[in-house]
Image: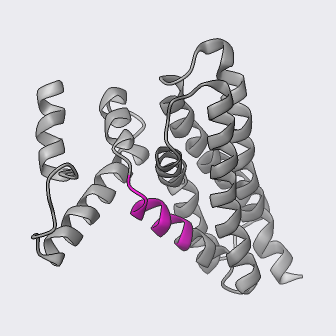
Amino acid sequence: LSSQIKTEESMLSPYFQGTLNEPILSTLKRDLLNIWYKMTFVLNPFADQRKKNYHIAQWDLWGPLIFTTIFSLTTSIEAGEFEFVLIFSVFWLGTVMIYFNGIMIGIKLSFCSYGCLLGYSLVPLVIASIPFSIFEFNIVVKFLMVLIFGVWSMYVSLRFMKEKVKMEKMFLVMYPICLFYIFFMGFLLTNHEVEKK
């Protein structure tokens, strides 16, 4: 497994190599491929957890920036720029709070690692937000979809954190992360209903 991971690292995440002389298109292609690769780990619940943990630990902030922007746009198309700023700000301020919570618990992860993990784990809710911004759904169907995709986001992030914290402190990690995604679930569930009124 370690040799396979090293091969994938050399192909998809050569961040430890010098890139100053690399063409811009090559850098862009590599970064997009890296984002896609991490996203497939989030979307595949049966992916090897050790490989998933390894690649998410090789943090980048391009993916989270893209996903939070898409989520903010799709949930604020009709509502206006205030909702866009609200969602975008809550994501990054929430990441800061979860980061400081992790420091107090004793988790040795950088802020960028938290941003990467929470941003990529938001992907299921981003996917749900796209059809919600285009079509009207029955409230029961919408609730079930938000619940499924929200639990999916929590599951991905908590499985990663499970490797970083002792079991007796797991609740202290779970609580703020679950609240973090519950906010986005609630906003996604109620946002368009409020707009219609």
Q: Quadrant of the N terminus?
A: top left
- Would you say residue 118 sits in the magenta stretch? no
Q: Where are the magenta residues, as a range?
A: 60-69
At horizontal 12% and vertical 46% (from top left) the residue drawn is 10
Q: Relative to 40, say whether 106 is above or below.
A: above
Residue 155 falls in which quadrant of the image?
Answer: top right
Residue 27, image x and y in percent? 19, 68
Residue 103 relative to residue 171: left or right: left
Q: Quadrant of the C terminus?
A: bottom right
Counting from the top left corner in percent of width and height, residue 8 is at: 16, 42
Q: Closest to the observer: 175 or 186?
A: 175
Residue at left offset 53%, top offset 72%: 70
Furthest toward the right, the residue is 197
Examine the image and state in which quarter residue 193 appears.
Answer: bottom right
Q: Position of residue 148 (x, y in %)?
A: 62, 46
Residue under the point 29% across and 52% down? 37
Indicate the position of residue 89 as horizontal and vertical percent values.
68, 67
Give the colour scheme shown: one colour
Task: Examine the residues drawn in magenta and state their main secondary structure.
Answer: helix
Can residue 59 be seen?
yes
